[in-house]
Amino acid sequence: MKAAGTLPATSPSPAISRTDEAARFEGALAPAPLAGVRVLDLTQVVAGPFCTTMLADMGADVVKVERPDHGDDLRTVGRYPDRENHEDYFNANNRSKRSIALDLKLGGDRDIAHALTRKADVLVENFAPGTAARLGMDWQTLRAINPRLVYCSISGFGQTGPYRSRLALDPVIQAVAGNMSVTGEPDGRPLQVGAPLADVLAGIFGAYAIVALLRAVERDGVGRYTDISMQAAMVAALGPRMGETLQANRIPQRMGNENPLRVPADAYLSADDRYVSIICQNQRHWEPLCRALDRADMIHDLRFATPAARLSNRAILNAEIVRVMKRKTAAEWVSRLEAQRVPCAQVNDYREALEDAQVVHRGLVHTLEHPASGRIRVVGPPWIIEGVETPMFPPPRLGEHSHEVLADWLGRDAAADSD
């Protein structure tokens, strides 16, 4: 067997930063929850790789199968002029994985993929529906090879239905799922969320389903298939806010940053031209909010005294708060509001969000030594599991671990045959 486009194998580089939270449990660390689980990753771009990164973060051995010519499409997106080897978008979604280069259109490389499937616990793909079957890597083919396999397909609209063959990227899903219709200013055009929300949600739901199905395989010894669509994931995530439509058949409209059921609830401009997000979630927050704003006179003002009154006088109340907020800086307002236990936050840009004191405390940003890009920073998993620390290593170079994976999964003879 010949593995296409292989590069010399190297050992994973260790993470050079660790969280204080994880360090608390050093000396009594248990194996990561998915330690020993083997994942064959046929995904690229965002939704699929995000799913398999979640599995890697839980300790799974994730082997990413990439085309020998240029690999994952994101390897060529987001490179900076002064850092030609820095695969920014790829690095964000592919840490802690190993890469093997295989051309699944070639019989020999497909044989290798089938051999790896026999050893895998999980396979994840996000080809366009029908592509996996053309490559001989579909569920029906692979379940015969490995009856205990958990197989996850992630696509824009799912493997069946009238939209099965439609092209889908994150903005398309945000549009069709209704998210854009409620995002933006009342008199403005529909807007998408400024991050690949549908991709990430599909990846999260995929990882959740996979972990559940692994438990089912332990119970009854039979592999399972799950079909995850980005559209379904997005609608499911919006479900908690769709009660108005589901129960009363009313269509919510765009309200900017305001809340249809609560006032005040908006991002207000401060004296230093920074926005502060404030929400008066319930009546318990009303008096503290008035005290923080030095407007105790509003507490018993009949126009604002109850949630219903505030809704009826939304424009008047918001105008008062807009005027008051211009008297102090964002930092001053956040300090005063927090002292009164009013839900609030300064609106951060990405740099401020990454450098936020709580993010730093939680150790969410990790620094890794990449063999080509040098020192890189990635956003790690949001969880902390007591007594467990999962090693994190850099995203792989294309085909970097081909020989290593063949030796680990198939034995030394298979690795030798690939030379």
Image (tube, helix red, strand yellow):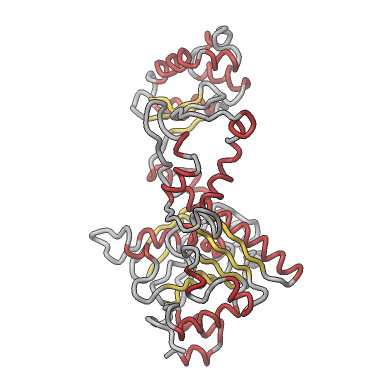
**Left or right: 378 with respect to 304?**
left
> In the rendered view, would you say 237 is above or below 216?
above
The x, y position of residue 391, in whole percent, is 54, 66
Q: Residue furthest right?
A: 220
In this view, which residue lies farthest toward the front? 162
Q: Residue at x 43, y 88 (%)?
A: 2
Residue 295 percent coordinates (x, y): 50, 12
**Front-most of 232 and 91?**
232
- Which residue is situated farthest in the left direction here? 81
Image quarter (top left, top right, bottom left or bottom right) of the C terminus: bottom left
Q: How many marks?
A: 0
Q: Is residue 107 left or right of residue 32?
A: left
Residue 69 appears in the picture as rendered = yes
Depth check: give the residue in front, 192 or 301. 192
Residue 335 shows in this picture: no
Quarter of image, res 243: top right
Give the image quarter of residue 89: bottom left
In the rendered image, the vertical position of residue 316 relative to residue 387, given as above or below: above
Residue 132 position in % (x across, y down): 50, 70
- Please name the residue shown 58% across and 35% down the image: 241
Task: Tell me the residue at 39%/62% (across/down).
Answer: 90
Residue 87 screen position, x and y as percent: 34, 63
